[in-house]
Image: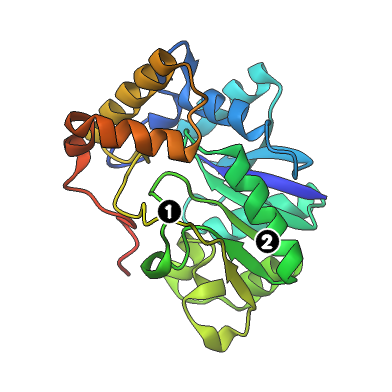
Amino acid sequence: MIGVIVQARMGSTRLPGKVLKKLGDHALLDFQISRIKEAKNIDSIVVATTVEDVDDEIENFCNEKGISCFRGSEHDVLSRYYECAKEFNFETIVRLTADCPLIDPVVIDKAVTLFFAEKVDYSSNTVPPETSFWPDGSDVEVFSFAALEQANRDAIKPEEREHVTFFFWKDKANGFKIAQLQNFEDWSKYRFTVDYPEDYEVLHLIYDEIKLRQVYGHVGEIINVLNDRQDIRIINRDYYFGVGWEK
């Protein structure tokens, strides 16, 4: 079974409660999941949040929406993913984070297809970041349960436990076979993830623009918006791909 695990929590230090902030008539998390459901190469979706009291709100939201929810460690996110995948019997895991509400289901399908076509342990479009041509906010990672189990058993460094997939790709000595989904243009300097208040402002403006243009908001369409509307793009220009990963 191919399962999407969406990592989400209310306790973001940069933009607290961001995953349930509104985009149009929907919470960001609800909007993101509606897009994930359009991917063809997945079987199930689970939101993985923490056991902290503040995240009761996420569990309640999931219950109201009929979305599966799992609760685990706040800081040992690797163990949260492992225990979640184990409970739901996922053989292949698609990792998404709730700060990417404009995720493109077409990119999800391409990353899953690449994973199986190349017979790898791990595939992604934006990782490793130094060779990615994809924008920040389009992030998809795919890995096997066997690889996740090995990482959960062997990863020791705090950053490997916090960032889930560092153990797969940061150190080749760990022996995982990886593949990166290539892009035909370099879009790596574009940003529509949501980490800061400025990002949230950008998200709203992109959302309004794609509605005005009557397009879905696939990655290329979002890039067109940002190219046409440099006034939007400059709002969060001080931030860059991989903020928070420098450990």
Q: Which residue is identified by label 1?
A: 134
Tell which of 143 and 14 is nearer to you.
Answer: 143
Number of numbered tags placed on the structure image:
2
Image x and y of residue 198, in percent: 22, 33
Q: Residue at x 77, y 55 (%)?
A: 86
Image x and y of residue 188, in percent: 35, 55
Would you say 239 lies left or right of 162 here?
left
Q: Which residue is drawn at 18% across and 35% down?
A: 235
**Helix, strand or loop status at disc 1:** loop
- Label 1 packing within 10 angstroms: few (<14), some (14-19), many (20+): many
Q: Which residue is drawn at 63% across and 69% down?
A: 152
Q: What amino acid is labelled 1 in the image?
A: Trp
Q: What amino acid is labelled 2 in the image?
A: Leu
Q: In which quarter of the image is the C terminus?
A: bottom left
- The answer, for residue 95, to whether it is visible in the render is yes
Q: In which quarter of the image is residue 83?
A: bottom right
As drawn, the label of residue 83 is none
Would you say 122 lies left or right of 244 here?
right
Tell which of 140 and 206 is nearer to you.
Answer: 206
Q: Classify 244 as above or below 118.
A: above
Would you say 93 lies left or right of 193 here?
right
Q: Which residue is identified by label 2?
A: 114
Image x and y of residue 38, in percent: 68, 31
Q: In which quarter of the image is residue 207?
A: top left
Measure the alpha-carbon separation of dots 1 and 2: 15 Å
Q: Classify 130 as above or below 34.
A: below
- Label 2 packing within 10 angstroms: few (<14), some (14-19), many (20+): many
Image x and y of residue 111, in percent: 63, 55
Residue found at the far top of this picture: 25
